[in-house]
Amino acid sequence: MAFAHFCKKRLPTCAAIVFILAVYIPYLFKAGWVCDDWMIIDHWRVHRQWWDAVRSWFPLFSARPLAPVVLSSISGVYGGTPRWYVCSQFLSLSVAWGMVWYVWRRLCGEKAAAFFLSAVYLPSIASTLVFSPGMQHLAATAYVLWAGSLVCHERAMSRQGGWLLLSGLLIFIGMLIYEIFLPLLVLQCLMPLYHAACFKADQSGKLATLGSASPTYLGFDRHTWKSVARTTVPLAVAVLLGLVVQKLIMPSFFPDMSRLTPGGLGMMLRTFLYWVFAVSVQTPILWADGLFRIHEAWDASALAGALLVTISLVLAHSRTTGAGEPLNAQNTARQSGDKPDGSVHLETRSNGEDRSHRNHFATQSCRVGVLRRVCWISAAMSVLLFVLSGSYAAVYGNDNRKLSSLWVAVALAASTYWTGPAHQQSFKRTRWLQVGLCVALLVNATSFLLQRNNYVQSWQAQEIILNTIRRETQRAEVPHGAVLLAAVPPVVPTNHNDECVFTRSWDIASALRIATNDHIADAVTLYPWLLVQGRLMVDGPRLVVDNLWQTDVSQQSVFFIGCELRQSRPANVKDFFARSLGKLPPLTVELRAPCTLVRNDEELLHSVRVATESLNVNPPMSHAARATQWWAEWMRAAVLGKPAVPLQERLFHPTILEQEH
């Protein structure tokens, strides 16, 4: 009975949890590592002692000195079992989003908190946060620390003690792990504006909407800004101390590896434009592609969960509005037995409410409106992560994790529209806005489900490719310590958002060292995208990839192999139910180029041309990536005045295109 009562009282949240589990269970049981995760396993295999493993990550993580502690700890506990990493990553993110849900329910009410949960777990434009269960433990840990800081700040609004100091300490630790949460600190800094709006409105006795509220009504007086300064100082000190460690202390012992290294004004402008392009062009393209492939995305469990969330939100909305009650956090708190801090307690009233009740109603609408604006400011501030680091924003591929703070801020901002309107005249507009938010949530979920399915297949693809290469290298009697040039697909055959299989030198090299017990010393993937994107160069006997990896056939034993992935059959109606259990059409691998020795310059050039031009070893880039590639080349030629390099000449071009893919 108690559980049934809890579910009834928390119906939207319970529905959101059911939806989240329906989406994630196939992934939790069927997925594995991807890209950077292989580095963690390779480190654990070589450095079994915890402290030895921590030291082995330097100088790569010298700017984030606590990151190796996280990576070495999880690899020491979970070892070489991918499912433990996947489940641990999910639980870590759940702790973070659970704390944010707790704060958001107190500030905005049950429906807003439930909508936030439904959205934040489906980061279609930052999916690597979820689908890279090894390396993205850093981001998950950082978000746990940020969420803990948010709880401390919410507590500090009405309680004395060391809550703000604890908040600053959590942020400082997070800065030494992964600074991905920095744009979200705006929410903590400006939280006093939320409480000031509530306090001043109660004193004024006026009934106003957010659109017509004056500064006096909002309560932004000198005391308010002192409160803002008081809450900002601990965070500012924590961030500054983190920067001192990153930029001054650690470079004294290791090379400066800090990502917070902005380029010149030209680079800052380009990174800003890339962020705008990612938000305004790449995201709509990604979601549109998802709608065209909606039959490949959804499964029975996820669809039932989505319908449950929608129905629960509608029922909760009609129940509160039908009773003539204000849709605010105080009403939610009264029903749950909690009293939000910094808010005025509302007693139970009948339909004949007086002017004081209407003032409280307008107060809550006003303060939620302030919170909404703060969230949108936080979302816009995410551009600084790219401008100040000289990196480019992208919604596709492994690098989209950098947009995770933008996604969290947008999920928070969108959820605030599920609080009640300030007056009945705006109810119809709010209702249609909420319908639009539900549609947007379903469209976003379609893209996320496609990515979930593809990352499940990515793990299957990686396993069969590694088994094929291991058998073929044994047949070819490849000597110990050889280097392998592997023409393998970078993404799955059903590519939607560049869900990677093997795309970088460090993922396939680490995976092959593990699979062959160090018989293969090093490896790199070769595929046509490298040539198109100008990331590949042949210089006599040398092959250079991404300006990060190189080999020399005159000094090393280099072998070449080519494989192609195929889906055994297209998706059909039966898959609608099978996908609920993570069962997808199986993949097959075809050996297109047997393992052969690369002896000289001519054979190296021939192998690279086969991998990038002759073998059809990969599906095309995602639509968002192709649009970005076209835009980047147009900007390079039309704006920067740099002549385009013909495709057939890019193998010999001395520089790599100034674009991050």
Image (cartoon, rainbow, N blue to C red):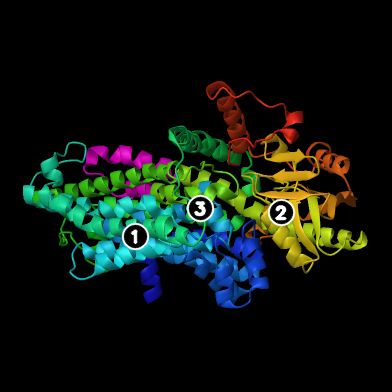
Disc 1 versus disc 2: distance between alpha carbons?
A: 56 Å
Q: Is residue 417 magenta?
A: yes
Q: Earlier in the sequence, mark 1 or mark 3?
A: 3
Report how far apart the C-alphas of labels 1 and 3 lie in the structure. 33 Å
Residue on which disc 3 sits? 122
Q: Earlier in the sequence, mark 3 or mark 2?
A: 3
Residue tagged 2: 574
**10 Å crowding of disc 3: few (<14), some (14-19), many (20+):** many
Q: The residue tagged with tag 2: helix, strand or loop?
A: loop
Left or right of 114 on screen, residue 564: right
Q: Amino acid at mark 2?
A: Lys
Disc with the residue nearer the chain's start (1 vs 2) = 1
Q: With 37 as the anchor, is 114 left or right in this view?
A: left
Percent position (x, y) of residue 245? 40, 60
Q: Give the residue displayed 41% in from the left and 49% down from the top.
A: 411
Using the image as rendered, state which of residue 154 and residue 73 is in the foreground: 73
- Magenta stretch containing residue 624, yes or no? no
What is the secondary structure assignment of the residue under circle 3?
loop
Q: Whole-percent x and y of residue 70? A: 51, 68
Query: Where residue 93 sits: x, y (%)?
Result: 47, 63
Q: Nearer the viewer, residue 133 or 373?
A: 133
Res 295 quadrant in image: top right
Toward the left, the furthest residue is: 204
Q: Which residues are magenta?
A: 412-438
Asked if the residue at tag 2 contacts the one at tag 3, i.e. Cβ–Cβ closer than 8 Å, the answer is no
List the single residue furthest toward the front.
Answer: 252
The residue wearing badge 1 is: 241
Residue at 20% x, 53% y is: 228
Q: Please, is residue 597 above or below residue 164 in the view?
A: above
